[in-house]
């Protein structure tokens, strides 16, 4: 079983790294970018029987700072991963 966790800053939380990317894109001539939000993707290779509830606990305790970040979980079987 595999899980993919997407972690993003919550709306309203300043994203200086995203703003730096937006500024750099503008400096390179990409004027159509009004905003950038930077996030991270964490891929987990899980033992059989590890469920989404356990992955959620991992997110709450370590993988995401739930005060300023939100997360979503995608579970995949080994055949589709």
Image (spheres, rainbow, N blue to C red):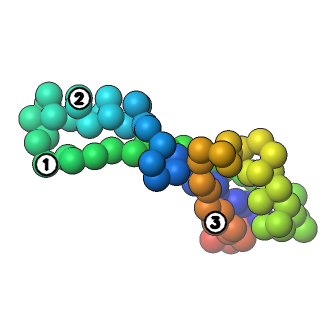
Task: Say few, some or many: other residues with alpha carbon within 10 Å of mark 1 (under 14 / 14 to 19 / 20 or more).
Answer: few
Considering the image in quadrants, where does the C terminus appear?
A: bottom right
Q: Say which residue appears at 43% left-offset and 37% top-offset.
A: 15
Percent x, y of residue 13 = 48, 43
Secondary structure found at label 2:
helix
Which mark sits nearer the N-terminus, 2 or 1?
A: 2
The part of the image, by quadrant, that contains residue 57 is bottom right
Answer whether residue 4 is visible to the viewer in this image: yes
Whether residue 16 sits left or right of residue 80 in the image: it is left
Q: Residues within 10 Å of mark 2 (few under 14, many from 20)?
A: few
What's the distance in space between the residues labelled 2 and 1, CA to CA? 12 Å
**Disc 2 marks which residue?**
24
Residue 55, position in %: x, y?
79, 58
- Residue indicated by mark 3: 74
Q: Residue at x 77, y 42 (%)?
A: 62
Q: Quadrant of the N terminus?
A: bottom right
Instruction: Tell which tag, 1 or 3, sits nearer the viewer.
Output: 1
Gap in angstroms between the C-alphas marked 1 and 3: 31 Å
Q: Is residue 55 left or right of residue 80?
A: right
> Which of the two labelled residues, at mark 2 and mark 3, occupies the earlier sequence position?
2
Can residue 46 be seen in the rendering of this structure? Answer: no
Q: Which residue is the site of mark 1?
A: 32
Viewer-proximal residue, 43 or 12? 12
Measured from the top left, where is residue 18 in percent x and y? 37, 37
Of the pair 51 and 53, the residue shown nearer to us: 53
Does residue 61 appear left or right of residue 23 in this picture? right
Q: Nearer the viewer, residue 25 or 69?
A: 69
In the image, what residue occupies the spot 69% across and 68% down?
Answer: 75
Kind of element beneath mark 1: loop
Mark 2–mark 3 distance (CA, rounded to whole Å):
31 Å
């Amino acid at each position: 079983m595999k899980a993919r966790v997407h972690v993003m800053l919550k709306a309203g939380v300043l994203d200086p790294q995203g703003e730096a990317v937006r500024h750099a894109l503008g400096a390179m001539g990409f004027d159509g970018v009004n905003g950038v939000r930077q996030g991270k993707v964490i891929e987990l290779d899980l033992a059989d029987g590890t469920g989404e509830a356990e992955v959620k606990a991992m997110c709450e305790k370590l993988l995401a700072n739930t005060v300023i970040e939100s997360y979503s979980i995608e579970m995949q079987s080994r055949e589709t991963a």
